[in-house]
């Protein structure tokens, strides 16, 4: 069976989550999040993060990120992110739409981690002239980053300190937060509010859910406007319990962690295979993502044999391979065999 | 069992739709609508409407309406709708967000049908002064209307003619389009493009789906920008096939029509019961909706017995009762008994 | 000499204001309002209004109104105004642009004064459903109204009370505020903050200036965001002293009041002439504005003789006549003669 | 007399322009640009640029730039400019406001000229993923650049070719266009449409006017939406002839070129003085701008003696010196003396 490394978005939905949807489909329940299942999920999230949180469930990562950013900014604000960030590269001008026109400032840095020095310098320059300048408001980081790298709590704290020194907030795009947690020993709390994250988009879609992301605010006061932004974006589901049902199953028995661990583990097998191949070389990667370079004829051959993966235009000659909880060792092995043949 | 007439949004998901989601959950498929199931649904919609269409699937009615309106307007545009319209009353300032600030002009009219004369007059006055004026761009009607009334093709054609005479487009909010079709003998084509509708939000969520609406453009050229607006609003699902799966089951064997017919039919029973009660009087309604007035003590009693329904603030002393495909005759009968007791 | 009743915008600039510009044109001064003349004008405005104010000078009434509204609203807000209001009828979708998409709700009422009862009812209905509803934020009135009517302090206080009861603000479009003050015995303070006005656009352009309006906040704390909105709209003049120079001359020796009194007084002569003519009848008016109806052949004749005035589409068969400080008795008399001939 | 090198915005208004305003202040004229003086200016601009143009007069450079960009973009668009560009550094989020949220992509390059290779690469990467990507729409350059550098027609043509190859437009911020023309032998046409510029903001404010910029479209078809954007931004002056009067005098007898030549010439004297001083070193500059580095104690001394100039935060230890048509040799000499003392 050829491998599908195209995206964690192309994988299916975990059976437990489908079953949860089926269970929730019977009978009536109050609309717009006033149901019991939603309350249960909110309570589960508070337990998971070991603190009081406000959590808004939405169906896409773009919505979670942009509603989060809109809540933490004004139309005069600047948002600082890495050039590879999803909010920069993959969400059209959705951040501008939701924030009523806040501006993104882009910085470089290895492994898609914003370079702290460049970040500090851009914040200083861009915000230096009062009303003429964009007002620095949010630093946004992704954990895992878009190149699969993982932030440690200390690294996160350095961004948080920079943010606080400038009266800014720290936002975390956690589309692959589960893979980040699975990749180390720290708790969700250790990787968020304990090191200064103000809000997190906690992804489920790429990790076994159908369409569900939780936008989590660690300071509930800051979340007041988020509900308005969500409604205004058309992201408040009337049958909200079907977002809640996905998260209920996702959190039950730490399914989220189990699935992310599976993705990360099988990626390790893929990475091993590639690192010992003479037909590809590893450029970057971590968690469930790997970025490799290959010659065109190798790429051609792999595609012809039915393997799926995409070019990554921001790195030279690069291709991205992504595993998910559904990736099989058979896929890995067939891919490596074809690569080496 | 007390009745839940609160909203068609509080009802569950039809088993066929859950089964379709479960079937689609197995295996990989291309993301973002490049999958086979999506193609199948697009083909089904073309058959249903008997013409070539461009259809965008999204998860909420607000998204479908607002992406549709944004596609047909500029930031200088005026949108003309009835004061009861969902885009006016229930979607926060989502229309302004998606259209980059087009303005809504509100008209009156019986049964939530925009009064044609007032409409024509408002279009003339509001657009009379060139660059100083808002440019009339879209007439938006809902079928069923928010008060449950149904438009005939002739009525729709009158709006279309007015629109065309002013270089405007005709948009139809079809959150309850299935109930409108079920309420008469005309086909979906008869009620849309054949009488001049340019774009339709074709609802499924209120009628048995989980979260799925199809934004249908009858002139595919006009739809080009819609995909950008959808992405920009964060409404392009990565695992798009789960929107498609809902619509696949919804359209299969005319399930959509069967469910809407069921809702309408059981509403007829409720209407009969209320019309012969001395404790309530009917103000408006049609399809699966009924608007009644009751004294406060009657309302109090019904709520205490566990029946669910909401006040409708734009009508005096009014309450809205909504049925769905899950409403049972037992609920109806218990409600009527309690009303009369 | 035929009369020019087309607009107070077609009149020239008062010599004192031109002289002030000439005086300010010599030598260097700090840019962006950090100059001495600006400080002097701010002090003059504080004296005029008998309280501490924050005043932003801009070059158009649309800018003053929309920056004011943007400062008092959020993107989820509703603004309530009369159907004849300038922000509704004459400013394209500028209010939506500046407010990031707040919505205007339009009410009726005689003389372009918003009907209090309808206003209260629309506020209640439109804001009734939490996050689904637009949040009532601002009542906007014009003094003079667009039909020339004048509000008394008691009338204004009634709007203010309604606003405060709903946590809203009261904004006053004062494009013809000078004519309103000139039309009665109350002070500028009496007609604004003393009866609850939160912010005022105080016009000079229509009353002898070149291009100058002061956006005045009576609660300076509320004005903090206004400077950002002004800059963001491109309305912060680099050579700000030329806005200040206009206002300096406008306020010196109460020139503003003298000019408005002249406009109002000469309008009285025109009104007398028309009221005794059988070829026109008065529909509305006050201050320096008059709205009359005439038969088409009368209109034709007057235009052919070179008189200038415009149709007013929102009133049936109506034409608007406006005087300014430059209107002469000769113009009035020639117009009346031609009307009666 | 100490020197004022703070900004060309701090200089006065040329007497000819004040006289033109005074002349225009007498008598009535149609509002909103329907007057004869406006027609005359439009005709002057067509002559100056040797082609048919559509020109919109506004009072600030931010307005001219942002209305221009809004006309050439959609809300999904990307605008590519140098990190030093005025639209990037000095206009808050005005570009985002006017474009309904188009995004700015920032590139580096010497002398504030966008590096062509980096530009091409950013356009390719940022626009590579269809609906997920921002759509490349406009390259924006400034001539003079913000560091005083001048583009030759060949250099401009290279940007134009890159733009055309990607279906993009080329916009020129000409706040100091007069200084660019004065700095070489090419005509205004040579520096704009003949080398592919689609629209230009042609500045007058920094070069002797009070508040006047012309937004010039070389393809009038593209300008249709510009008038709506201008009105919507509150930048359509009612007494438009006072913008026209400024431009009439500015263009009469090539006053614009005479003033820019004066600014450039006196800057040459300043540059000479500084280049032979041991207390300052030149970092960049051209036209009427010079960027120098000085030790803090030198800066301190100059400021204490009353000279005015500002730090330039985006260059290390840099200060900007700007001359205008009012700068005197006495100012230059006193500054140099104090610098060397």
Image: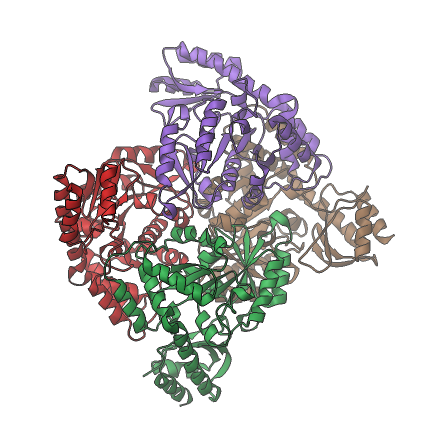
Chain colours: A red, B green, C brown, D purple
In the displayed image of the protein, which residue is found farthest to the right? C341
Give residue C339's position: percent from left, percent from top: 83, 52
Give residue C308's position: percent from left, percent from top: 75, 46
In the picture, measured across the screen, residue B153 lies left or right of residue D128, that is right
- Work out which quarter of the rendered image holds the N terminus of chain C and state it: top right
Which residue is found at the position 58% from the left and 70% from the top?
B155
Which residue is found at the position 47% from the left and 62% from the top?
C166
Q: Nearer the viewer, residue A330 or C289?
A: A330
Give residue C290's position: percent from left, percent from top: 72, 53
| Quadrant of residue D133 within the rendered picture | top left
Which residue is found at the position 34% from the left and 69% from the top?
B249
Task: Tell me if residue D322 comes above or below residue B268 in the rendering.
Answer: above
Which residue is found at the position 48% from the left and 73% from the top?
B180
Residue B111 seen in the figure: yes
Q: Nearer the viewer, residue A196 or A151?
A: A151
Give residue C129's position: percent from left, percent from top: 42, 66
| Quadrant of residue C57 within the rendered picture | top right
Residue D11 seen in the figure: no
Task: Tell me if residue B45 comes above or below residue D104 in the rendering.
Answer: below
| Quadrant of residue C319 within the rendered picture | bottom right
Task: Tell me if residue B166 comes above or below residue B247 in the rendering.
Answer: above
């Amino acid at each position: 069976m050829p491998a599908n490394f195209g995206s964690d978005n192309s994988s299916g939905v975990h059976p437990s989550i489908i079953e949860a949807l089926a269970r929730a489909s019977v009978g009536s329940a109050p609309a717009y999040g006033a149901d019991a299942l939603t309350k249960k999920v909110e309570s589960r999230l508070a337990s998971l993060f070991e603190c009081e949180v406000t959590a808004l469930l939405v169906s896409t990562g773009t919505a979670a990120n942009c509603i989060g950013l809109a809540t933490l900014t004004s139309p005069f604000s600047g948002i600082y992110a890495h050039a590879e960030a999803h909010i920069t590269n993959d969400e059209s001008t959705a951040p501008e739409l939701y924030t009523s026109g806040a501006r993104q400032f882009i910085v470089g840095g290895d492994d898609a981690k914003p370079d702290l020095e460049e970040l500090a310098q851009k914040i200083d320059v861009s915000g230096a002239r009062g009303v003429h300048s964009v007002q620095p408001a949010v630093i946004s980081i992704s954990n895992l980053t878009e190149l699969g790298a993982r932030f440690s709590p200390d690294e996160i704290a350095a961004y948080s300190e920079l943010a606080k020194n400038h009266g800014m907030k720290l936002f975390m795009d956690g589309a692959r937060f589960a893979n980040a947690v699975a990749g180390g020993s720290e708790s969700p709390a250790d990787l968020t509010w304990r090191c200064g994250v103000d809000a997190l988009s906690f992804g489920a879609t790429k990790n076994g859910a159908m369409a569900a992301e939780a936008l989590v605010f660690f300071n509930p006061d800051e979340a007041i406007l988020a509900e308005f932004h969500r409604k205004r974006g058309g992201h408040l589901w009337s049958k909200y319990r079907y977002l809640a049902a996905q998260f209920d199953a996702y959190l039950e028995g730490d399914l989220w962690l189990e699935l992310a661990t599976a993705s990360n583990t099988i990626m390790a097998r893929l990475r091993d295979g590639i690192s010992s191949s003479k037909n590809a070389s590893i450029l970057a990667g971590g968690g469930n993502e790997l970025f490799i370079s290959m010659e065109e004829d190798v790429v051609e051959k792999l595609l012809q044999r039915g393997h799926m993966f995409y070019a990554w235009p921001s790195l030279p000659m690069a291709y991205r391979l992504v595993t998910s909880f559904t990736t099989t060792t058979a896929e890995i092995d067939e891919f490596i065999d074809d690569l080496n043949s």
